[in-house]
Image (cartoon, coloured by chain):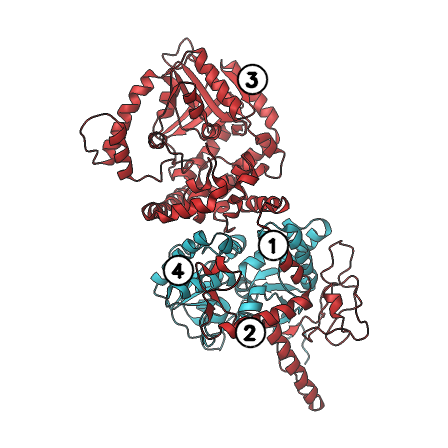
Chain colours: A cyan, B red
Amino acid sequence: MTSTPTDQSSPPPALKVALFITCLADLFRPSVAFASIKLLEQAGCEVTIPLKQTCCGQPAYNTGDFESSAPLARQLIQQFEYADYVVVPSGSCAGMICHHYPRLLAGEWRERALQLAAKTFELTTFLNDIARIRRGDRPAVALPTVTYHDSCAGLRELGVKAQPRALLKELCDREVSELQQSEVCCGFGGTFCAKMPEISGKMVGDKLANAVATKARILAGGDLGCLLNIAGRAKRSGEDIEVRHIAELLVGDLDSPAIGQGK
Amino acid sequence: MKQTSHTFLDNAHTALQDRDKAARRDFMALFTPLIRNAAMDDFGHFEELRQHVKEVRQHTLDNLDHYLTRFEREALHNGNHVHFATDADQLNSIVLDICQQHSARRIAKGKSMVTEETGLNDYLKRAGLRVMETDLGEYIIQQAGETPSHIVGPALHKSAAEIRELFLAKHDLGERELAETSDMVGEARKVLREHFLKAEVGVIGANALIAENGYSMLVTNEGNGDLCANLPNVLIVCTTIDRVVPRARDATAMLRLLVRSATGQPQTCYTSFYSGPRREQDSDGPLETHFVLLDNRRTEILASDYREMLQCIRCGACLNHCPIYAATGGHAYGWVYPGPMGSILTPLLTSLEQSNALPNACTSCGRCAEVCPADIPLPDLLRDLRHDENRQKLSSSRWRLGMRLHAWLARHPGLYHACTGIGIAALHLLGQRKGSFTQLPMASGWTSERDFPAPQGKTFMHQYAALQRADKAREDKSAAVAKPPRRRARPGSGKASGERQEPGLRADWPLKPDPRRPGKTRPGTAGGKGTGKGKPGAHPGGPRGKKPRSRQSDDR
């Protein structure tokens, strides 16, 4: 196939995206990764997946073990800096790359971290603001009522707030039933939830109560850490609300059991 | 004040058991951000002004010796005495000396977190002096024998009913009901007035010290600061060296954010500037005035990586917005300063050893930094303290080892994917029916409060590699009829547009040992030790099948 720059009908060149799956999606929720690939391809991107990717180093970093975290940061930079864009279906992992790598690393590595940060995006931000995904001729994805938890790192480090809502509207024609205190932390906080379980339990209890009060069928979010926390609490307290990642909703993947639900 | 920061978790547990108090805190956690946000929205220039305030604070700290000297000179010129105290004991003894020089027996005291820090009240009490707190909140907790739970609202943890009981028990005023809040406030005013009139010395704090004119600034809503400052013959202003700002207009710029951040008011009811002793033409005012400026490790903080903490203007917004403070209340933090700012100051002003739980009482949610009027990166400083904790081996060895092990494994992708592949498949099989676990070994922290969701299936990497293999088989079969391959996200192919190639990619998974180079390690590969010398694109890795590498090399 040939096309020239003057050929008005030719599609714009595909955005070349490397997908950072994140360790939680890799281990606990591969459907998030598959949904992300599908969305990026729907948006006309060319997606590659560096197969040696593991973890961004956030757990060690947040517990204060910078010395263990830095080699993981350098590893990820090496694995992903070839790409035009790096997309991450998690606000906290994207925030780790964009904001904390330059803090963690020095010298040449800091420069490389800054370069990577400039082309790294959280999934919904990339889809909505960069790739500008549109529904086009596809039918709207049918969804039951949805409420949304704004995960802290995505919200405050990357400004993710309008993007998931805009995508739900565009691809699913679904407005979010907003929950009270949607910008207050769910109590996950990485190792915090295991180090200070009682305080974390109080926080996730409040979050769940606010979500249930919306009477939405699904609580969605953009960060699996928070979603595992909220889903685990919902399961424990027998609340009838499905917890799912936003990427799954946007591709209409409601067949697989929600997080923490059995077959 | 006896420090109990090391038992933070137990303190928090106790606090969470008291349902009434927890409900009060929940209400305050809703209410205080609302009034702060409304005030800032109304004001409209939060971000610009906070950048200005931050610059002013940083500039002052960068030139602290200059501005302190200037302040001292101006304050002396105004007729004040100026004292510098290196630590808490020194401040306390300076204040006691002044009181004793004037044979004072009664002290009227305005709200001052600095004197909470030094334990001044107890010190003076032991020397036989009678100290009366005159801020209503401080007065209430003094009567109750408690400590502040909040740096702005010290008695926020107490209900009206508790305060009623307290006043009925403590004030010997006969039969009365105190049915309304206003009755209680009226009673406190009556009791306090007596004391204001009898006190020989007044002690207050300061929100700012103004270098250009030697004045101190104080904000209150009750006017008690002015009564402490003007009725007794002697006034002592106790504050810390980091309160100094260059100019009067810097103090008022700060004020615009301070009060809105603290109480949601555009301005406090009283904003006072104290210049010095009564002059000949003045009809009232103290005859003698002192500034006692405390260091207490501030110069150490100034020289450390935590210097930004000295930008703090003590508004309490970080407390009001912290979900952990909301859950536990201020007393759980076990020392003078609670919440995010306290979790940084307490280790710095006391010791990390005694208070290393506090920097961990943070989810890095960033709400505190978002509202901080001095733009202090509180979550980053808390994380840096956790770094110190980790380096000093103060954290639990189990956690430290776990983190190191996880990071080590994640630096060896082949081994990582093999181990997680097996572990996750097993967890999935065990948990797939119910979808979650109510208990798991080594995860009691998680499962004590919530179920542990089971993995959805095999790991993504495992599933993806299988799909790649199937694709490849299909491609090979159909190569003869030249069908286009099925479209699927490709493994990083090294088809880079830039000069840097994506290193170390291969689609065949799990990684197999290289039969040609058994046991050999490969230099300069992905996940290198970060010398910065290895050129990432230089190694011979590349698209699948081109040059399989040894497992050992990946597990290095």
> Marks 4 and 2: in contact by CB < 8 Å?
no
Q: Label 2 belongs to which residue?
A: A38
Instruction: Tell me whether marks 3 and 1 sit on the same chain.
Output: no
Q: Given the image, what chain letter belongs to the residue carrying mark 4?
A: A
Q: Name the kind of residue labelled 4 in the image.
A: Leu
Q: Name the kind of residue labelled 2 in the image.
A: Lys
Instruction: Tell me whether marks 4 and 3 sit on the same chain.
Output: no
Residue at image coords 54%, 35%: B350
Q: Given the image, what chain letter belongs to the residue carrying mark 3?
A: B
Q: Say if residue A184 shows up in the picture.
A: no
**Mark 2 vs 4, N-terminal side:** 2
As drawn, the residue found furthest toward the left would be: B175
Q: Given the image, what chain letter belongs to the residue carrying mark 1?
A: A
> Marks 1 and 3: in contact by CB < 8 Å?
no
Mark 2–mark 1 Cα distance, whole angstroms, equals 31 Å
Q: Label 3 belongs to which residue?
A: B73
**Of residues B131 and B272, the one drawn nearer to the viewer in this rendering:** B131
